[in-house]
Amino acid sequence: MENRLKVAQYITDIVERLQVEGYETYIVGGAIRDLMLKRNPKDYDLSTSATPEQIKKVFGKRRARIIGRRFKLVHLYHGREIIEISTFRSTPTKTGKPNLEKFADMPEQMIFHDNEYGSAEEDAFRRDFTVNALFYDPVAAKTIDHTGCGVNDILDGTVRVIGESELRFEEDPVRLLRALKLVGQYGFTLCEQTEKALLNSVELITHASESRLSLELEKILKGAYCDRIFAAFKRYGFLKYFLPYLDKNWDSATGQYAMKLLAVRNRRVATGDYRDSISMAMACMALPFVEATYGSNGGKLWSYEYDSTPQVIHGAIKKVFAPHHMIKRLNFSAQKMLQLQAALLNPEQGERVIRQKGYAHARELMLIQHEVMGNFTEVIDKWPKRVSTPHHRPPFKNNRRRKPKKRPPR
């Protein structure tokens, strides 16, 4: 199918280089979906007939790094960007669970090994949904739809599992999450068969590894659609397994305030008003629960008179995101911007607050709150957007000049 999509030139160059070396190579996955829907892809994934070792040989060990155990692939570095390159795979023949006690209650068809290489067509049919199974060759400007449904399903906004729906969800329960991400992020609808299988299988997500689910949560929070994705999770009964505390409080004033803050944050990310900070999304979700602890829900912040504030903030973040373990850097950043909110009500503390690490994040959170509740009217214009502070070279531990070593006598 001839249809030139607007692909970044450096991606075309990478594909062409692998093709010149004799390896069949395509752009795969979400980038094609975004390009067909006239959206800018957040990243590009490539798939090729070359093995990870062969890819590394083409681009050199300084640019290409092999990662993964269950699913080996290559991270190719282009400046600060990482392009993920996988090798074509076939449907795994070994689906049985390992003979270990901890896997005793796992679904029988759950996949534990997925490194069997195959052809491009085999790779397409082992993917989860038709909208994710398209291949695009940017050099030849050619779209390949092995399932025969992918292009139409993207244009119609339909999520359709490739193969037998319940079996595919049992093979990898994270597909449940990814199906609902498509519903939330793109406004797609599940086809009848996929929807029925998902509703029957939703509890399987409890068997997915904690690390994979935490990584998926980070991806959701980084994007500009997390409020819509969480709404889709709630609608299909998935949220109670993924974020049980949020699910329990969803219909409360506190839960709805959190979603309003998150929606404003997402709009500001989408329009380029602020960057896609994961910790900012975390703070938006946790802030109403911190306020609720002090008997408030929007418009009235805690103050430094409460000695327990740092512990309350830490506890709120932990509860909202349980059972996931967010990395320390994100936790610290979210806690810091929440702690600074009370100080932003007092511009007299300006210089002290402005110089604190995390001020820019705290100011952005203040703007988000103000748009939802209007609780910073008197002070919002008194906090500068950018702060230029003189750059001081950090002192050396020992500024004294070293004495020359004495040479031994001849």
Image (cartoon, helix red, strand yellow):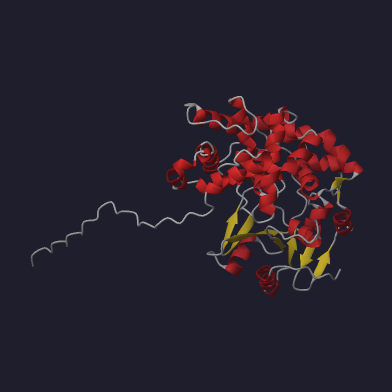
Q: Residue furthest front?
A: 378
Outermost residue toward the right in this view? 192
Report the residue at 60% width, 61% height from top: 81
- Where residue 138 appears, x then y in whole percent? 75, 70
Q: Is residue 378 left or right of residue 257?
A: left
Counting from the top left corner in percent of width and height, residue 333 is at 53, 42
Query: Which residue lies at the image location 67% right of the left edge and 34% below the top edge?
Result: 99
Among the 4 quarters of the image, the one containing residue 5: bottom right
Q: Is residue 369 visible?
A: yes
Quadrant housing the C terminus: bottom left
Tell me which residue sits at (54%, 28%) in the image: 312
Asked if 269 appears above or below 100 in the picture, the reply is below
Q: Residue at x 86, y 59 (%)?
A: 151
Quadrant for residue 183, please give it: top right
Residue 182, image x, y percentages: 79, 48
In the foreground, 49 or 15: 15
Question: Is 314 on the left-hand or right-hand side of 157?
Answer: left
Q: Residue furthest left?
A: 409
Q: How many marks?
A: 0
Give the quadrant of the N terminus.
Answer: bottom right
Q: State which quadrant residue 330 falls in.
A: top right
Q: Is residue 105 visible?
A: no
Taking depth in this image into account, of 263 and 277 the one nearest to the observer is 263
Question: In front: 21, or 395?
Answer: 395
Q: Is residue 166 left or right of residue 28?
A: right
Residue 282 in the image: state x and y as whole percent: 61, 40
